[in-house]
Image: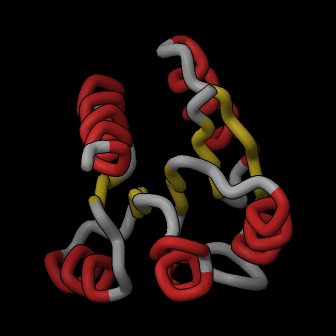
């Protein structure tokens, strides 16, 4: 089954996103910050990561760089999802290796569309 890791320090945001993804048939693993996500990914790498940016211990930019540089095969696609909505924030997120940048509050249809697009791209030859 396709697994998405949701990384956010807000339990409410994690729950909302997890519910949305599960309704679309995806398995979800949750983490409260980048360090927790790192530990979980070492044993069970997800097919896609959705991460907040502003979190304690390890922020989303750091996690994104770790996924892209340390995970086998260049890591999973990463969606940065944050309230930080300035053009610079989006630019910096993509420079860190992000595959998409979605601003909170996100549109559910936009989120699912981007998740499906990135998952399909990651399994295509």
Residue sitting farthest toward the left: 87
- In the rendered view, would you say 85 is above or below 12? below
Residue 48 % position (x, y): 50, 50
Question: Residue 52 vs residue 57: left or right?
Answer: left
Question: Looking at the image, can residue 106 be seen?
Answer: no
The residue at 70%/52% (across/down) is 10
- In the rendered view, would you say 88 is above or below 82? below
Question: Looking at the image, can residue 40 be seen?
Answer: yes
Name the quarter where the N terminus is drawn: top right
- Front-most of residues 41 and 96: 41
The residue at 25%/49% (across/down) is 125
Residue 43 % position (x, y): 84, 61
- In the rendered view, would you say 116 is above or below 102? above
- Front-most of residues 86 and 90: 90
Q: How is the image coloured?
A: secondary structure
Question: Residue 89 vs residue 66: left or right?
Answer: left
Question: Residue 11 vs residue 49: left or right?
Answer: right
Residue sitting farthest toward the front: 125
Q: Quadrant of residue 106?
A: top left
The residue at 23%/74% (across/down) is 90
- In the rendered view, would you say 102 is above or below 85? above
Residue 98 % position (x, y): 34, 71
Q: How many marks?
A: 0
Residue 49 % position (x, y): 53, 55
Question: Residue 39 vs residue 58: left or right?
Answer: right
The residue at 25%/30% (across/down) is 113
């Amino acid at each position: 089954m396709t697994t998405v890791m949701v990384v956010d320090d807000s339990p409410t945001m994690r729950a909302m996103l997890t519910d949305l993804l599960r309704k679309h048939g995806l398995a979800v693993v949750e983490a409260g910050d980048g360090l927790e996500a790192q530990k979980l990914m070492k044993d069970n790498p997800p097919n896609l990561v959705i991460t907040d940016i502003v979190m304690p211990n390890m922020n989303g930019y750091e996690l994104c760089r770790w996924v892209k540089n340390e995970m086998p095969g260049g890591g999973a696609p990463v969606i940065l999802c944050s309230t930080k909505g300035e053009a610079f924030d989006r630019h910096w997120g993509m420079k860190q290796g992000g595959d998409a940048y979605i601003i909170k509050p996100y549109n559910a249809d936009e989120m699912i569309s981007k998740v499906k697009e990135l998952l399909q791209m990651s399994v295509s030859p």
